[in-house]
Image: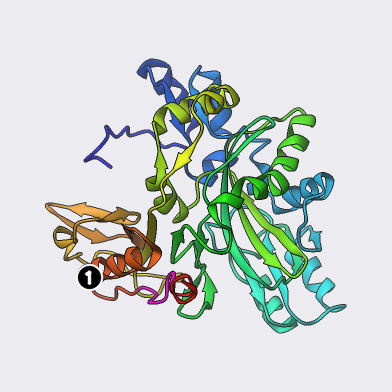
Amino acid sequence: MSLFARLVDVPPADVPRLEQHVAAARIDLAIVGPDELVAAGIGDALRRAGIASVGPSREAGRIEWSKAFAKEVMDEAGVPTARWAAYPDASAAAAALDERDGPVVVKADGLAAGKGVVVARDRDEARAALLSATIAKGAVVLEEALEGEEASLHALVDGETVVALPAARDHKRVGDGDTGPNTGGMGCCSPTRILPDDEAQDAANALIAPVARVLAKRGTPYRGIVFAGLIRTREGWKVLEYNARFGDPEAEVLLPRLEGDFARLMLALGEGRLAQHVAESPVRWSARAYVSVALCAEGYPGKVESGAPIEGLDDLPQGAWAFHAATKRVGTRYVANGGRVMHIVAGGDGVAEARRLAYEAAARVSWQGRFYRSDIAAREVEVA
């Protein structure tokens, strides 16, 4: 980030210190990224400082940082979702499993860095999930396991104004063929045949707008990005979860498709002028396709080793970029410094071209233990 911006040595979760900084820095616009900062109320602090903020209040952001709250709001809004039940702790959830068997989704009620969801095939797997460090420490939600194809849908939300962005197709599980544990996202593509661009607004009207209306009715209007994880079942689209921010890796394939002035669009949203802005300058996106491939450290999504030097970043083909996620600069080199180390993104006239270039670029970047899925966007190409 230091290549593009001035970095400020203030822990983002230290809200009082951050308020002091922004009061003196003449900042016009803030876009809140990390989910833990939404839960910490950073949007409230920024607005108190008079800064246009694309990020909800702490209370409105509960649709992400409390799975039970999100389900309650969905039920009130009439948004289709999986049947669910909330429990105060893992022990109570484990007791409830005695009355059921078969597939079940086990979710930590709070934030868990993208690792708090386990799709268990049976009671034994569900009990094992309840003992995991990310789920055992707090309240738990159990859901019915839904079957179908998934899509990610982002929308700009300003009170009751909801403007959809193009949909993307994410790949959550760590291994090819959607095998292994869930991750924060191993790659994605946009557009996607599952939810075409021209159907995105209708989906947002049905699956996001009702929740926005409920939040406004409760006196906690939402202002920011809502990112909905969707699944298309036999009964139609249902919501798996909401996120109160741009998604990762979805944003890396969505934002390159947006046309017009992104900063002005975000400023209008942050200032509460979204409806007026889009009436004058409708949101448009290009027909180009983008594919993202996550390069990960050995052991992800579990324990990983850091410090391995990264090679090949200066040899990417034209039209491909590396979005750093968990790297560290040591001297003139970058080293791996986490699990999902970076995303390689490439564009093309169609998904097939974007996919080919993304994988060509991914193959040029390496470090000891580096791995990535080989089938990102493969089903889009097969269908095409």
Kindly state the secondary structure of the residue where label 1 is placed.
Answer: loop
Q: Residues within 10 Å of mark 1 (few under 14, many from 20)?
A: some
Residue identifier under label 1: 366
Q: Overall secondary structure of the magenta stretch?
A: loop
In the rendered view, how is the structure colored?
rainbow
* Residue 275 place in picture, x, y as percent: 60, 26
Which amino acid type corresponds to the residue marked 1 in the rendered image? Ser
* Residue 7 part of the magenta-drawn span: no
Does 239 sit above or below residue 64? below
Does 12 sit above or below residue 237? above
* Residue 128 place in picture, x, y as percent: 66, 78
Residue under the point 53% across and 45% down: 165
The magenta segment: 372-377
- Position of the N terminus, as image quadrant, is top left
* Residue 226 place in picture, x, y as percent: 59, 43
Looking at this view, is 250 or 333 the one in front?
250
State left or right for residue 82 relative to residue 366.
right
Does 195 sit above or below residue 270? below
* Residue 10 place in picture, x, y as percent: 38, 33
**Image quarter of residue 307:** bottom left
Q: Is residue 17 visible?
A: no
**Image quarter of residue 211:** top right
Does 303 sit above or below residue 89? below
State left or right for residue 362 relative to residue 202.
left
Looking at this view, is 379 or 243 the one in front?
379
Residue under the point 47% across and 57% down: 191
State left or right for residue 132 relative to residue 24.
right
Residue under the point 45% across and 79% down: 176
Q: Residue furthest left?
A: 332
State left or right for residue 209 relative to residue 264.
right
